[in-house]
Image (cartoon, rainbow, N blue to C red):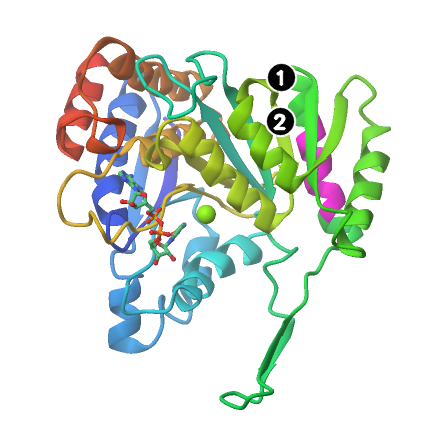
Amino acid sequence: MTTHHIALIPGDGIGTEVLPPARRVLDAVSCRHGFGLSYTSYDDWSCARYLREGAMMPEDGLDRLRDQDAILLGAVGHPDVPDHVSLWGLLIPIRRTFRQYVNLRPIRVFEGVESPVRGAVPGAVDLVVVRENTEGEYSEAGGRRNRGFPEELAVQEAVFTRAGVTRVVDYAFGLAAGRSGRLTSATKSNGIVHTLPFWDELVAECATGHPRVAWDQEHIDALAAKLVLDPARYDVIVASNLFGDILSDLAAAVAGSIGIAPAANLNPEREFPSMFEPVHGSAPDIAGLGVANPLGAIWSAALMLDHLGHREAADDITRAFASVLATTDVRTPDLGGTAGTADFTDELLRLL
Ligand code: NAI
Ligand code: MG
């Protein structure tokens, strides 16, 4: 029997509440589909550790992850730790060291979920945001000067490379070719005069290698508006790091709640482990209440199984949660229900 070694990093806040449900679901399907999962849990890689010891993870943290088959992460972030410290102390080093340059974020409006958007009827909205995950606007290039003086300033450089843009855009075209054959590139090459015209050129170059994919580009501001007004028109959207981050939260809200959105941080070449995590953060406002929606984490776990070569097991999971939503009224408060995290998970396991 194949056994996959999974690193679990629950993190902070509701991250620690949504990973155990994901693990229960994983154990249920792995057993049925005849493969094993063994876990190493890094419970204290978190803001609590940072507050105690000054680092989110141990110095050799990345080395400990290197030989795992995949990483399943909850969320990091705590009100007592600046967000850039928690993000750059754990998540971003993992994404960059392991060359997880594709951040795949599928969004669907499920039967039984009421979208806040009138046009977003169940079944009609089924899209994927492909976010560039290792460069772009999220860069360390820049600095602060003259802190506290009237001439204080901050400069932040965005970094777009030919290799970095091409590989993620090429991945997105490949994905679109296997879906409906439509791709939209998010840009802002009217206002941002160096990096995004370069992005547009590289997208056009990549397109020549995928003649069967119909593609266009839209400025991010107009794209955001259209994603609300007519979400069903999109299939695959490829975007830079920042644009993709924002668009995927927006798309998740269109689908009913950020609590259901999953993400896969992929190293497509499989030289390193890929990382799977819900799109949402640690949600300090509801942490500890037992009402966090575990669906984002559970769907992320399904993406992980798909990546590990277990498509059928992954489909079992997505079918089971779609059926909880479509056939029962068991759902967490973010989706208008009264169920707790555990109630929802129990119901899902029952239908599984
Ligand atoms: P957030 O995603 O944690 O919360 C935004 C809103 O959505 C909150 O009202 C929250 O209650 C709700 N929400 C999120 N997930 C939910 C779920 N599963 N079920 C029900 N409701 C849910 O984003 P926010 O408030 O901007 O950030 C909170 C902390 O999380 C910050 O420290 C931030 O840096 C961190 N963060 C971490 C991320 C990560 O680890 N990947 C991603 C985004 C934020
Ligand atoms: Mg985000």
Of residues 269 and 192, the one nearer the viewer is: 192
The answer to if 260 sits in the magenta stretch is: no
Answer yes or no: is residue 33 visible: no
Q: Secondary structure at mark 1?
A: loop
Horizontal and vertical percent for residue 179? 62, 17
Which residue does the numbered mark 2 point to in the structure image? 236
Callout 2: 10 Å neighbours few (<14), some, many (20+)?
Answer: many
- Residue at the image point whose x is 84% and y is 42% from the top: 201
Q: Secondary structure at mark 2?
A: strand
Horizontal and vertical percent for residue 127? 54, 24
Instruction: Establish whether ligand 2 lies closer than 8 Å to the Cβ of label 1.
Output: no
- Residue at the image point whose x is 19% and y is 27% from the top: 345
Mark 2 or mark 1: name the one nearer the start of the chain: 1
Q: Is residue 25 left or right of residue 166?
A: left
The answer to whether the residues at label 2 and label 1 have Cβ atoms under 8 Å apart is yes
Q: Which mark is residue 179?
A: 1
Amino acid under disc 1: Arg
Amino acid under disc 2: Val
Q: Is residue 95 above or below residue 277?
A: below
Q: What is the CA distance from the residue labelled 2 to the residue labelled 1?
A: 8 Å
First to last magenta residue range = 165-173
Does the magenta stretch mainly form a helix, a strand or a loop? helix
Q: Is residue 241 left or right of residue 115?
A: right
